[in-house]
């Protein structure tokens, strides 16, 4: 299968330029048996050439002195099943846990933006029950999302761990299983808050990271809590009109210093995943220096964007017509990326969250 009518002359701001046909059999439904045994397509930014490797060979492709930047966000089991007090079943997905707001002075009550699936959309004032320790009330609804106030009689994260489910992406057409709690989490996940994994990082094992360190590659951890907005489709014809979702990020001073020191002496910054790329580019000033701090990142990167800090990136294969595919196209060029995708399809690479990876350098 090949992309639909994608030609070098096509307008890079036209959503159709980022469409392609993917056989459903290539959408990975389960993770690889071993994290680092995924396949790795290497794409050269200089000439568009490709090579086929295994992810475990990444160490050979990195250089001593490189800084590998990883997103240490941790996926929370943000999918909750319950019922209305009137009796109807509901499924609730916390989509902005990192941006939750405490209600008043009570630590056991907070508001969070959610998606709700029910036979009939709940109105403001609808009360929800999840278990004896967790209740909620719908406060308002806007653009398909709901502001929900939760009340809990135990530590909320303990309740989530007990009754919550891993929020697998919609293209994984199965219910979450026990192994997903481990598999849909990077080995360096540390900061609770994401509702989707930074999937490029899923390929790293602890052993591979140790090999990379021994080679002389530095590792810097930053945080961007991936929200459900990463799966939201682009609904405009001209991609420049798309409104990017916001996600909470944090870069501490030691990480910023490590990255800035490498840049100052010409060493490469290798970003793991589109989330790391967006965070670094958002936090960089006009001179390519990272500013430590925290905030809301809403940077939309598409062709024409001039990168300030990222020299190479590791990423998975992304959905057609997605902002993630647009970011990768901005980094390596739309036509080389779409050509590489055609090659990956022909070679039967596995796509999306549990799929194979690319190194673009």
Image (tube, grey):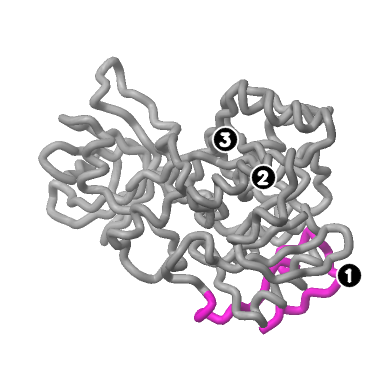
Q: How many marks?
A: 3
Q: Where residue 268 sits: x, y (%)?
A: 77, 41
Q: Earlier in the sequence, mark 1 or mark 2?
A: 1
Q: Seen in the image, is 238 located left or right of residue 7? A: left
Q: Where residue 204 sits: x, y (%)?
A: 53, 53
Residue drawn at x 28%, y 57% as measured from the top left:
118
Helix, strand or loop status at disc 3: strand
Rendered view: 251 above or below 238: above
Quarter of the image for residue 177 reads bottom left
Specify few, some or many for label 2: CA neighbours under 10 Å numbering under 14, 14-19, or 20 or more: some
Q: Are the residues at dot 3 and dot 2 in contact (C-beta closer than 8 Å)?
A: no
Please name whichever residue, 172 or 71, is drawn nearer the observer in this view of the structure. Answer: 71
Specify few, some or many for label 1: CA neighbours under 10 Å numbering under 14, 14-19, or 20 or more: few
Residue where numbered disc 3 is placed: 221
Residue where numbered disc 2 is placed: 215
Residue drawn at x 70%, y 31% as measured from the top left:
259
Q: Which residues lie in the magenta part?
A: 1-26
Helix, strand or loop status at disc 2: loop
Rendered view: 24 above or below 226: below
Q: Seen in the image, is 37 located left or right of residue 303? A: left
Mark 1 vs mark 3, foreground winner is: 3
Quarter of the rendering occupied by the C terminus: bottom right
Q: Residue furthest top?
A: 105
Distance from disc 1 to disc 2, alpha carbons, whole Å, reads 42 Å
Residue 128 numbered mark, or none: none
Helix, strand or loop status at disc 1: loop
Q: Are the residues at dot 1 and dot 3 in contact (C-beta closer than 8 Å)?
A: no
Residue drawn at x 79%, y 32% as measured from the top left:
263
Residue where numbered disc 1 is placed: 9
Q: Where residue 84 sits: x, y (%)?
A: 18, 49
Is 184 a magenta residue? no
Is 23 a magenta residue? yes
């Amino acid at each position: 299968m090949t992309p639909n009518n994608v030609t070098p002359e096509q307008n890079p701001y036209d959503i159709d330029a980022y469409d392609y046909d993917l056989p459903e059999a290539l959408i990975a439904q389960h993770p690889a048996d071993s994290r680092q045994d995924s396949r790795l397509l290497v794409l050269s930014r200089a000439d568009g050439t490709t090579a086929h490797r295994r992810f475990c060979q990444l160490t050979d492709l990195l250089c001593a002195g490189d800084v590998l930047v990883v997103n240490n966000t941790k996926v929370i089991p943000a999918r909750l099943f319950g019922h209305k007090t009137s009796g109807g079943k509901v499924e609730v997905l916390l989509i902005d846990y990192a941006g939750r707001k405490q209600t008043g002075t009570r630590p056991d009550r907070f508001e969070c933006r959610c998606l709700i699936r029910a036979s009939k959309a709940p109105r403001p004032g609808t009360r929800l029950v999840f278990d004896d320790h967790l209740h909620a009330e719908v406060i308002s609804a806007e653009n398909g999302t709901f502001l929900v106030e939760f009340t809990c009689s135990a530590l909320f994260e303990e309740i989530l761990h007990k009754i919550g489910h891993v929020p697998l992406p919609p293209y994984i057409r199965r219910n979450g299983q026990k192994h997903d709690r481990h598999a849909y989490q990077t080995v360096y996940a540390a900061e609770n808050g994401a509702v989707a994994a930074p999937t490029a990082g899923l390929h790293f094992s602890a052993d591979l990271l140790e090999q990379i360190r021994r080679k002389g590659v530095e590792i810097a951890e930053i945080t961007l809590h991936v929200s459900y907005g990463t799966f939201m489709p682009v609904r405009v014809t001209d991609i420049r009109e798309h409104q990017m979702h916001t996600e909470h990020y944090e870069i501490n001073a030691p990480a910023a210093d490590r990255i800035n020191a490498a840049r100052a002496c010409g060493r490469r910054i290798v970003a793991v995943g589109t989330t790391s790329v967006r965070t670094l580019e958002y936090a960089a000033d006009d001179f390519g220096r990272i500013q430590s701090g925290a905030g809301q990142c809403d940077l939309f990167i598409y062709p024409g964007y001039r990168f300030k800090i990222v020299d190479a990136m590791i990423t998975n294969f992304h959905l057609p017509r997605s902002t993630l595919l647009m970011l990768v196209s901005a980094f390596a060029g739309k036509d080389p990326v779409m050509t590489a995708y055609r090659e990956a399809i022909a070679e039967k690479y596995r796509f999306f969250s549990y799929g194979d990876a690319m190194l673009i350098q």
